[in-house]
Image (tube, helix red, strand yellow):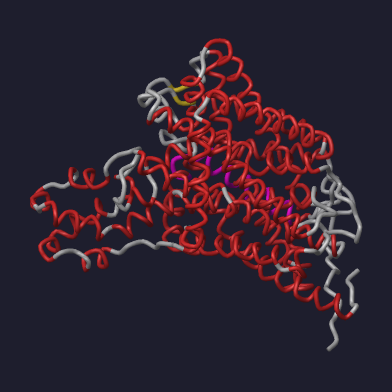
Amino acid sequence: MQVKPPFTELEIKKQPSGFYKDNSLPIALISKGIMVLLVIWALVFPANANSTLGSLNGYLLGLFNQFYIVIVGLFAFFLLIVAILPQSGRKVMGVPGEKPEFSNFSWFSMMFGAGLGVGLMVFATAEPLSLWGSNPVVVAGEVAGNTEASIQSAYRYTFAHYGFHAWAIYVVTGLSLAYYAYTRNMPLTIRSALTPLFGRHVNGPLGHVVDVLGVVATILGVSVTIGFGVSQFIDGVYAITGVEWIMNMGGDVPVPSKAGLIAGLFTIMAMSIVSAVSGVGRGVKYLSNLNLVLSLILLFTFVFFGSFFFAMTTYGSAFVDYIINFFSISFGSYGPQSAETFAAALPESAKPFAGDLFGGATNAYGAWAGSDGFETFRSGLSGAAAELDDATLKAVYAAGDDGRQFGWQSSWTTFYWAWWIAFSPFVGLFLARISKGRTVREFIVGCVFAPALVCFAWMTILGGTAIDLELNGGAAGAITGASQTNQLFATLAQMISGGLLSALTIMCVVLIMTFLVTSADSGILVMNTIMSGGEQETGIKHRIIWGLILTAVIGTLIVAAGENNPMDALKNAMIIGALPFTAVMGLMMIALTKALYRDGKREKHGVLGE
């Protein structure tokens, strides 16, 4: 049987001269046009933009929540199989015998900083604490939130959101790009990953659409990351300086004000643009190494002054529980529960009141921050429905479990999957850029399993300390009562005091700042790489322009949120923008399966690509 060489004749037409010299004009203009229209919409009609994005996001989650969950589960199992199989795992991404460009330390630090740096600073304490109060087991009413009994399920889903699934999303994109770039000498751009399926058709409009989807997803994914990070940066600056204009002091707890967020955003993005101009070989590498060193200092502070024994016992038991439940986490998906389905499951005595009972029984947020979901449901009833006996009301609450599980999953797990997917063109392409010369197995193990295990340690040491202080250490709500982005500083304040606390707070602010700069400048470099058809070196003026566009997108969507959480509009836009790229990633997985299989046959028959 004759085996043809792979298709490698990818042609991306670039401008020969002018402002867009060496860039693809359709990709650049369409990507910038979409972002500029979003900025104008959010700036001129902020209330309309915020409400429309929220409504559209809710509608799409109702349709595609299960799609998000299942496809991410497929990504994780696909990479596991590729790594295990000898034929695919041993392939070198480069010429045989080629050495990796970066040392293992620099490779890991750049991967760590770009992939989850800011997220770990914000959510190392916030994620375990939030899930301690509300997770699917708590929502189902099986255990009470914010108790010792809910710790195991809290970490089951903490590990899910920051573990093998999260990094598998990055690696599906990164492995696809690196494989074609270094084994077939193809451009390091998104459309290259679909050539095994579509061949020369990606040279035209189809390829432009794929690359534009990658750019848009990248901008929105990076925007959410920077939004969370800037909020924590402002919390840290306030903890150090006490300057009140950067905070909104009118609520139960101080939270960053819009003025503070915009000031912090401008500061971070100015530094990011300067770093991006210096390129990956200098700015990103040095900042990433600094990030890793400072991260280790913070980690060891929690080891020495925090609840290390509690953290390590939690790590062991939580990891076993995570592995046991890995399959159900991967594919256990929920759709919206209809009023008809709910009514059919009710006891006969409750069926006349189905309309009054439906909203409360299917509300996932009744079980939040340690609240008893059933008690919240019961206390919200009025009229004849409130007269039903406890046994009937408990059966009613059980009948609404699928609706509550959908509400929780769509607003939590699916948000994370969409965030990682939106981030994956950026992180995946960045991982590909720094991984030439490594084997497929090394790439998967190094970029999925190793960083996930570090994330687990980070989450259990920092988050476990916060939970232990609340459960056993007398924090008395000081940590759980703080804003999400301030919980790290609140935990430090419960652990230590005096000059050491001040020094560590300053170090955390510097660490957040360098993580933010690393994420933003890496994102700017990746966007320019896509628009230049995979070129490693891109024009400085375009890096500056994309830095300004990114700043405008984040700033206007923060303002558009109005009196709501400043992150709401950003998160809604990101989940919407991630959906089309999710489908692209599914095609990438199929294409890579075909490429690995066909290349194995080519090796067997001595037919090699160029």
**Which SS does the magenta portion mostly show?**
helix
Give the mark count.
Answer: 0
Q: Is residue 376 above or below residue 3?
A: above
Q: Quadrant of the N terminus?
A: bottom right
Q: Is residue 5 above or below residue 50?
A: below
358 is within the stretch colored magenta: no
Kindly indicate the quadrant of the structure image that contains residue 276: top right
Q: Quadrant of the C terminus?
A: bottom right
Out of 397 and 551, give the one closest to the viewer: 397
Q: Is residue 152 left or right of residue 302?
A: left
Q: Is residue 342 above or below residue 504?
A: below
Judged from this view, the residue extending furthest toward the bottom is 1
Out of 230 and 488, give the one closest to the viewer: 488
**Which span of residues is magenta-colored?**
27-49
Judged from this view, the residue extending furthest toward the top is 498
Q: Is residue 228 above or below residue 198?
A: above
Residue 591: where, in percent of width, then height? Answer: 70, 70
Kindly indicate the quadrant of the structure image that contains residue 402: bottom left
Residue 444: where, in percent of width, then height? Answer: 70, 56
Residue 91: where, in percent of width, then height? Answer: 81, 64
Kindly indicate the quadrant of the structure image that contains residue 341: bottom left
Residue 415: where, in percent of width, then height? Answer: 50, 50
Query: Residue placed at 63% from the left, 51% from the top?
Result: 167
Out of 99 and 579, give the one closest to the viewer: 99
